[in-house]
Image (cartoon, rainbow, N blue to C red):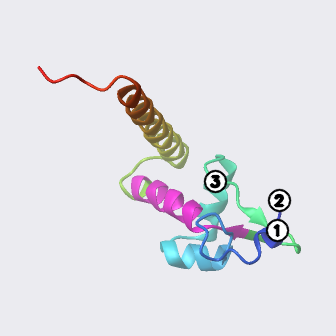
Amino acid sequence: MTADDSFGRPDDDDYPAYTMGRAADMLGTTQSFLRAIGDARLITPLRSAGGHRRYSRYQLRIAARARELVDHGTPVDAACRIVILEDQLEEAQRINAEHHRVAESVNPPTAV
């Protein structure tokens, strides 16, 4: 999928609206930081038809969390791993909550 495939969805959190330069400016970081977290596979920016990296708002939130950890002294690779684990934990908690909702709808708790 290229950035151009998402045309017409600017309100979508996954829409790759930001160039690397704009993303770096918004995060208050460098383009090399964005390349480093890409190399660590924290985020994979989409590419425009011309091959330029494009970032979504979701990816910028992920990058901002990694930058926060790096600013506090965490190495980039470790910060990326922490963010990945945080994201996995959040997803597991969401799935667990959904399972609990389904279970309660099938077997509602009885009043004692």
- The alpha-carbon separation of the residues under discs 2 and 1 comes to 6 Å
Residue segment shown in magenta: 54-69
User: Is residue 65 on the magenta stretch?
Assistant: yes
Q: Earlier in the sequence, mark 2 or mark 3?
A: 2
Q: Residue at x 35, y 28 (%)?
A: 104
The numbered mark at residue 5 is 1
Left or right of residue 64: residue 110? left
User: Is residue 96 on the magenta stretch?
Assistant: no
Q: Secondary structure at mark 2?
A: loop
- The alpha-carbon separation of the residues under discs 3 and 1 comes to 18 Å
Left or right of residue 13: residue 50? right
Q: Decide: few, some or many residues near mark 1? Use Cα within 10 Å; few <14, some 14-19, many ≥20.
A: few
Q: Nearer the viewer, residue 71 or 38?
A: 38
Where's residue 44, x and y in %?
Answer: 70, 55
39 w.r.t. 60: above or below: above
Left or right of residue 20: residue 3? right
User: Which quadrant of the structure image shows residue 3?
Assistant: bottom right
Left or right of residue 12: residue 66? left
Q: Decide: few, some or many residues near mark 2? Use Cα within 10 Å; few <14, some 14-19, many ≥20.
A: few
Q: Amino acid at mark 1?
A: Asp
Q: Residue at x 68, y 74 (%)?
A: 9
Q: Secondary structure at mark 3?
A: loop
39 w.r.t. 88: above or below: below
Q: Residue at x 39, y 51 (%)?
A: 73
State if disc 1 and disc 2 touch (CB < 8 Å): yes
The numbered mark at residue 43 is 3
Q: Amino acid at mark 3?
A: Ile
The residue that mark 2 highlights is: 1
- The alpha-carbon separation of the residues under discs 2 and 3 comes to 15 Å
